[in-house]
Image: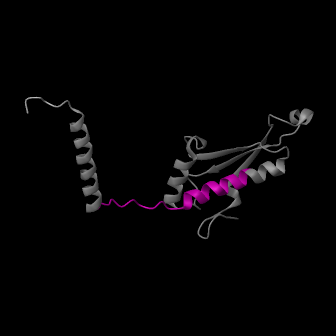
Amino acid sequence: MIQITSGIVIDDKEIQMDFIRASGPGGQNVNKVSSAVQLRFDVRSSPSLPADVRARLIRLAGRRVNENGVLIIHAKRFRTQLHNRQDAMDRLIALIKRAAVQPKTRRRTKPPEASKKRTLDEKHIRGQIKRLRKPVDPGE
């Protein structure tokens, strides 16, 4: 069991990890050892996630969620399988924690009267400046 927040706990069985060969540093070892981790978590059919968190997680993950609703995280930053596995889990937990935070709803407000008056005064002053730029009519 993986504790995400006080209300969200994910069962280990819901997470699938595959080990693949990683590119990058490692010398000859890179061609022999499968140290990169591909973590898969089925977001759509996970019983551990509430519906609102599930929807936010799919939106936050973006292209990392495929058309079947499976979140795929590739971890190949480190040379060892153990570190990459931990990195993938940390990234999954961080993503779910971000999705668990409910965004504040925006309340529309009206601008205050003083702000409206200031805007109109500034427009009036700007208009006066522009009128003063015009050439003086000798007939007046």
Q: Closest to the observer: 4 or 101?
A: 101
Name the outermost residue toward the left: 139
Residue 104 painted magenta: yes
What colour-coding does the image apply? one colour
Residue 99 placement (x, y as % from top left): 55, 57
Q: Quadrant of residue 96?
A: bottom right
Q: Quadrant of residue 133?
A: top left
Q: Give the side of residue 127 with respect to residue 37, left or right.
A: left
Q: The N terminus lies in which quarter of the figure?
A: bottom right
- Relative vertical location of residue 117 with respect to residue 127 in this rendering, above or below: below
Residue farthest toward the right in the current orientation of the protein: 28
For this view, does 1 lie left or right of residue 67?
right
Left or right of 111: which side holds 83?
right
Q: Residue furthest front?
A: 138
Q: Position of residue 38 (x, y in %)?
A: 72, 44
Indicate the quadrant containing the C terminus: top left, top right, bottom left or bottom right: top left
Please state the extent of the stretch shown in magenta in the rendering.
Answer: 88-112
Name the residue: 53% across, 55% down.
54
Does 98 sit above or below residue 24? below
Which residue lies at the image location 65% right of the left edge and 56% below the top edge? 94
Can you say whether 138 is above or below 119 in the image?
above
Q: Is residue 3 positioned above or below 132 on the image?
A: below
Picture coordinates of residue 44, whole percent (x, y): 55, 51
Query: Is residue 9 at all visible to an observer of this figure?
Result: yes
